[in-house]
Structure formats: structure tokens, C-alpha cells
Amino acid sequence: MPHALLSLITYIPLAGALVAWLFCRGGEAQDLLARRIGLGTSLAVLALSVALWLGFNPATPGLQFETRLGWVSDAGISYHTGVDGISLVFILLTAFLTPLAMAAGARSIRTQAREFVAAMLLLETALFGLFSAQDLLLFYVFYEATLIPASLMIGIWGGPKRAWASLQFFLFTFGGSLFMLIALIVMWQQAGTTDIPALMQAGFSHSLQGWLLLAFLLAFGVKLPLFPLHAWLPDAYSEAPAPASAMLSGVLSKTGAYGLLRFGVLMFPDAAHLFAPYVLALGVVAILYAAFVAFAQTDMKRVIAYSSFSHMGMIAVGLFTLTAEGIDGAIFQMLSHGVVIAALFFCVSAVALRSDTQQISALGGVARQMPVLALLTMLFTMANIGLPGTGSFVGEVLVLMGAIHVSFWVALLAGGTMIMGAVYMLSLYRRVLFGGLQGTVHLLRDLSMGEIAVLAPLALVTLWMGIHPGSFTRLFDPVVMQAMHHGASTAAASLPDATVHLAAR
């Protein structure tokens, strides 16, 4: 049973999607049944994911819960899955956010509930497969599989510009993935296998590492997104319905950062040192550019979308500090950001659904009518700007601790996300929650018990991550430390002493 646990987590959502699709055809009663199947399936997967967490040994940095089956064995390709501490935390994040997004869809998704449930569960299966894949071709298959349900959720249930937003998202991501496919084929030709642990030990030449890392930067930089590959993000996040926005920003964007970590920083450490100055510069530009643009937005969801882009720049900086502190901070920031940004999209959606507008100028004084929403939104706003006691603060401090080893100016400019984030987020909060009463705001009703049930777990996890971050860092820190020591030892023969010292930090 322990060995089958990861497979159950991965494929139970697929089974739930098929059940909902085949047995819930037409009518309100069938739509309600589909929603119940979706919520029940995602909650069952969450329970199994917690069991996976409890059965995981964080003192062992290697793979656990492994499954290896023959696939295209003659070509060195297998169905190989397993988790280490890094994979585990993203599986937990996916399992945590999916039932909340499913529950949020009960209010915001009015039509085609069966199709929505199927798309959400298919996305969950693809994400679990992606984070647990230990074969590069298998990873590519699951990575591409996330495109279909995500694009459909934007295109079917999105806003007025949903068709364009969905098309942009698909084309950008699919185009970037072609570079990953080319890199995959080159690596297979060189090593004779696509098994990720074997590729980690393949010893690619320095020049080839550089070209491979460039391909992965283009592939994953779109999903992260890395400046200037972000053109799809504002429309996709703002046009998508709240459950899709939560999954896109909360988990799907993390697949880009996860890929850069796995197939950049950890697999090609020599090339990562070569590219680090450029990625750090792009990360800092993303932080500052997105913050300035966020302040100029007139739509609530677009402010949150650019805020997400700014924080993903912070994650890119953490990864390419190439220090244990910076990488730990980037992983922690990914988890915290996933929780907080999903909560903010749910809060904005609660107001937009009641007032029938996302325009900031059309809103004001919402706190008088919705005090519970105002309280929870304040918590998530403070978390988004990195207030001590929230998870974002821990992640940002660790990233800055890693950045200071590289450059004082990188740390200073990256730290600007905390100051500028406070400006645009508090401005948004003041104008919407405490401005003068506008239009029909006086008719708004506060959060329902169902909406509180969605937001309360997000609030608790936000505080848990800020107060007791060791619950999470102990899972992935051993993997990061092992990788840093391995990178330092392999680089010792070819890098100057100062650079080796930096890698060892």
C-alpha cells in the first residue's frame, strides 16, 4: 500500500473526472451531483496526501514512494515516479488548493458544472504527475497535459475577453514547451535515457549544459513567468473565473519555477552559475516593473495578477542566488505565494460577484457591508506584502539572505517588492474597502458560510507558515543542502575559489 499511495493520489482525480463526465449528464440535479463528486474526490485526495506527508521521512533526501514500470524500455524510457521533499510540498499545495477551488466554483461557475469538475480534476492529476515524475519524457507529457484543462477553464467560464486570454495562454506555454522537447531529445541522445536521476549524473559538457539550460529557461520562463515572457499573464489571470485564477496563480505558475529548479539549478550547476547574473537581473526587473504597473491598474483582478508577477520575480531571484538560503526561500515563497494569491483572488471574486464589477472606481465602503470579508482580506493583504507572522515574510527574508551573498544591490532592489507591494496593495484595500460608498455597494451582503469555509483554511495555513515555518522547511531543506554540497564538490575542479565558496553557502 505505501508504494501505491502516490499512484492513488495521482489517478484518483482522473477517475473522479471520468465518473462525473459519464454519469452526470444534464439538469440541475446532475450538476449538483457532479459538484459533489468533484469536491468529494478532491477531499479524498487531500486526505491521502496528508497520509503521504505523515509517511515521508524528511531525514532521507533521496526519493521515496518510488514506482518504476517499463514503458519504452529499449529507448531508456520508463514510467518512473517518486517524491523527495521538494516534490512533496508541491503535491501538498496542489491537494490543498484543489478542493477549495472546487468549493469556490459552486458560486462562481453557474453553467456546465460537469465540464468544470472534469477539467479541475484533470488538471489536478496532471499536476500530481508533473511533480512526481522522475522521467523527463513523463514530466513533459504531464506538463503539456496541464495546458488543456487550464485553457478550457479560461476559455469557457472566463470574462468577456476569455477567448483571447485562453489562446494567448495556450500559445505562449505550448511554444515554450517546444524548447523543452528539443532539450529532452538532445539529452536522450547524449545519455541514452530520459530517467531524471540518471540524467543528473550524466556529466554533460559545459557548452552543452549552457544550451540546455537556455532551452529550459525559455520553456519554464513562460510559465513562471520570467520577464519579458509574461504577456499572457494579465489577461489570463483577470479573465479566468476565480477557481481557475486560484489554480493558475497558486499552483500552475509554480510548475515553471519547479522546472527551473529541477532542470536548471540542480541539474546544470555550472551553466546556472553562468546564467545567474542575467536571471537575477530579469528577476529584479520583474519585481519592480510589475509593481509599478500594478499601481496603475483600474481592475482589481489585474492588480492581483501583476502582484503575482512581481512575487514570481522574487522567486526567480531566490533560485538563481545559487545558495541554500536563497533556494529554500524561493521554495517557501512558492508555497506561501500559492496560498495567499489564491485567497486574494477568492476575496476579489466575492466582491465582484456581488457588485457585478471588478473596476476599483465603481467600489468603495465595502467594509461597512462586508466586515468579515474586510478582516480576511486585510490578513491576506498583509501576507502579500510580507508582514512578519505570515509565510511570505519567511520566504522573502530567506531569499534576501541568499541575495546578500551575491550582491548588496540585488538584495536591496529585490527587497523593494515589500515596500512597493505595500503601496499598491494597501491602496487597493483602502479604495475598495474604505472609500466612499459607491453605486449599489450598500446592498452587498457579507460572506456566506460556504465562502468562509473556503477562506478560513487559507488564513490558518498563512499564519501557520509564518509562525512555524520549520514544519515545511524540514521537508525540502535536506534535498537543497545535499544538492548544494554536491554542486560545490563537482565545481571545485573547474571554478575559482571564490565561486566555489559561493556555491557552498
Image: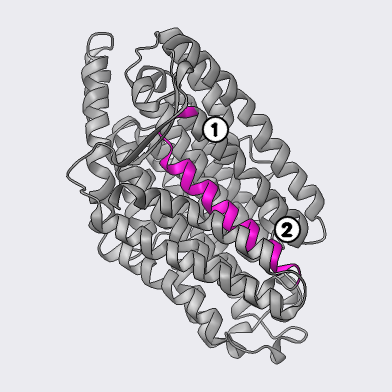
What secondary structure is marked by label 1?
A: helix
On screen, residue 360 above or below 72: below
Q: Quick one: label 2 or label 1, which is nearer the N terminus?
A: 1
Q: Residue at x 75, y 49 (%)?
A: 165
Nearer to us: label 2 or label 1? 1
Taking the image as drawn, is residue 51 in sight?
yes
Q: Along the horizontal axis of the image, is 462 left or right of 423?
A: left
Question: In terms of depth relative to the viewer, which is nearer, 213 or 126?
Answer: 126
Q: Residue 28: which quarter of the image?
A: bottom right
Q: Is residue 244 visible?
A: no
Q: Residue at x 39, y 36 (%)?
A: 319
- Tell me, what colour scheme is on the image? one colour
Indicate whether residue 358 is drawn in magenta. Answer: no
The span shown in magenta is 111-136
Residue at the left extreme, as displayed? 59
Is 116 part of what is drawn in magenta?
Answer: yes
Dot 1 corresponds to which residue? 140
Q: Residues within 10 Å of mark 1 (few under 14, many from 20)?
A: some
User: Closer to the camera, 327 or 424?
Assistant: 327
Residue 59 found in image quarter: top left
> What's the residue type where badge 1 is placed?
Tyr
Q: Which mark is residue 239?
A: 2
Q: Please state, as top left, top right, bottom left or bottom right, where the C terminus lies in the image.
A: top left
Taking 399 as reference, is 440 above or below it?
Answer: below
Q: Amino acid at mark 2?
A: Glu
Q: Nearer the viewer, residue 88 or 414?
A: 88
Left or right side of 85 for 220: right
Residue 173's x, y, as percent?
65, 37
